[in-house]
Amino acid sequence: MQSASKEPVTAETALDLLQGIDEMLVAKGQKIDRFDLRQGRPGDDELLALLLGRSGKLRAPTIRAGKRLLVGYNQEMVATLL
């Protein structure tokens, strides 16, 4: 676990989080976007737009669960993981 306030993840290191990740789920309000990174990985600019907030730092919460990366908060998405 990493504290985003003490060690913020910025664009330079955000893409490194995708190493070993097969699926990324991104919550934006009630909408959940799913990305199968094995089949068709979006470009780095698109991935950074999904991973980073307006501040240029990693969106919170970001949770790595096995080969999944969950970005943002959505109750349904978190319940699916647990």
Image: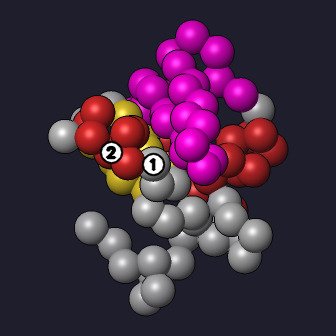
The x and y percentages for residue 77 are 39, 39
Is 51 covered by the magenta stretch? no
Total numbered circles: 2
Name the residue furthest left. 82
Tag on residue 16?
none
In the image, which residues are magenta? 19-42
* Residue type (three-letter) at the residue carrying disc 2: Val
Which quarter of the picture shows residue 59? Answer: bottom right
Q: Is residue 15 visible?
A: no
Residue 38 colored in magenta in the image: yes
Residue designated by label 1: 74
According to the picture, the residue beneath numbered tag 2 turns out to be 78
The residue at 68%/65% (across/down) is 53
* Nearer-the-camera pick, 60 or 73: 73
> Horizontal and vertical percent for residue 69?
42, 41
Quarter of the image where one finds residue 10: bottom right
**Mark 2 to mark 1 CA distance (whole Å):** 6 Å
